[in-house]
Image (cartoon, grey):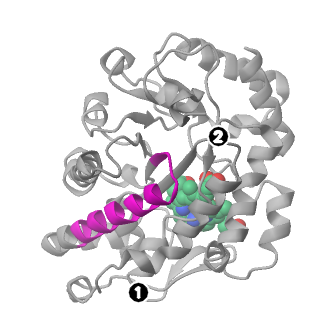
Amino acid sequence: MNISDTPFLKALNKEKLNTPPIWYMRQAGRYMPEYREVRKKFKNFLDMCKEPDVCCEIALQPINKFKLDASILFSDILTIPDAFGLGVNFVENEGPVFAKPINSPIDVSNLGHFNPNDLDYVYKAVTNIKNSLPENIPLIGFSGSPWTLAAYSIEGRSSKDFSKTLNFIKANEIETHELLSKYTDACFLYLRKQVQSGADVIQIFDSWANLLNKDDLKKFSFDYIASLISALKIDPVTKNVPVILFARDPDCSSKILINTGADCISLYWTMNNFDMHASKNKIALQGNLNPKILLENKETIKKETFKLLSKYKNYPGYIFNLGHGITPDINPDKVKYLTDIVREY
Ligand code: CP3
């Protein structure tokens, strides 16, 4: 079976299909009892990501349980800052905490050189997952966007408003660009290795795009994403690998997203005014059910899902997904129900 004949790759190639391919952001995670069982064995989440066999087992859990149309590498976006020596730890009930965040401009110039081989554990996980998947299930590799990685690295942890980061970029524009360039180069090398190891598709997560106003979004995030994508599109290893861009609620026009060079835009659940006429036949779309709908009863889930499916049903190249990741409070039975009704529609 050629991977380009699978529904997921066909949709990414802007083909209109009767039933959309389905996968979910955070399809492997804490909402699954099988995941929690494995997770118990590790204190620090990143230690678990450093075990390729464990990553493989976890990545396959949702595939086996829900028969999804694509698998995603089990890892995290913060592997890159960790490889740069910033010391990423996941603390219970707090999320990621950096031992050595970027506090001053000097920290940027002192940042070490990125050696992609430091993340061999990720590429091994990619190969293991690819070898364990049925041959008709494509594998998605991923990275954070340079901006989202920089935001975590400066803030040093998760935050509601990332005020330390926003002050830093205003006060230290040159060093911010230096950091973003380093992360862009690292993302390129990292994604290239993932493709060499078996990833069929790439997704870039710009999870903190929403922190920036229009001008800053272009300057600090989308210009770097565009240069990352253009590097991928000219490299012989990655040039034919479709790129999906997820940006959380960005303050920009649809045209700007279309012009990043991505093959597919993953729509956040609030992005209901995306210009589908402008993107038609140029770009595939993925999304964008509000994950919180999965906390409702089946009747509501069905109503909201059918509404969404009717909106996208004639769109050439549509992939069913949520508008952001599945949260830990969601019952797996609802994920099964959702998957079934999308296929039944
Ligand atoms: O199934 C999948 O989607 C694959 C695995 C995956 C994880 N993280 C596993 C994970 C992917 C693609 C990511 C990407 C990621 N990591 C993003 C971008 C996606 C998004 O949600 O916007 C971000 C921002 C991160 C950084 C991160 N990782 C944070 C802030 C946290 C802690 C907060 C939280 O949601 O728990 C994580 C931890 C994390 N990454 C978990 C999982 C399954 C939970 C860890 C645990 O079990 O303790």
Closer to the camera in the image, 240 or 64: 240
Q: Report the residue at 45% width, 53% height from top.
A: 207
Give the labeled residue for mark 1.
Answer: 85
Image quadrant, ligand 1: bottom right
Label 2 Cα crowd, 10 Å radius (few <14 / some 14-19 / many 20+): many
Give the labeled residue for mark 2.
Answer: 137
Which amino acid type corresponds to the residue marked 1 in the rendered image? Gly
Closer to the camera in the image, 180 or 282: 282
Q: Main secondary structure of the magenta part?
A: helix
Closer to the camera in the image, 331 or 72: 72
SS at mark 2 in the image:
loop
User: Looking at the picture, how far across and down is residue 33, in whole percent?
Assistant: 86, 58
User: Looking at the picture, how far across and down is residue 79, in whole percent?
Assistant: 49, 72
Q: Is residue 29 above or below residue 265?
A: below
Q: Is residue 201 magenta?
A: yes
User: Looking at the picture, how far across and down is residue 123, in whole percent?
Assistant: 52, 67
SS at mark 1 in the image:
loop
Using the numbered discs, state the Cα–Cα distance from disc 1 to disc 2 in whole angstroms. 35 Å
The segment highlighted magenta reads: 179-202
Quadrant occupied by the C terminus:
top right
User: Looking at the picture, how far across and down is residue 211, in whole percent?
Assistant: 36, 54
Residue 336 visible in the picture:
yes
What is the quadrant of residue 138 in the picture? top right
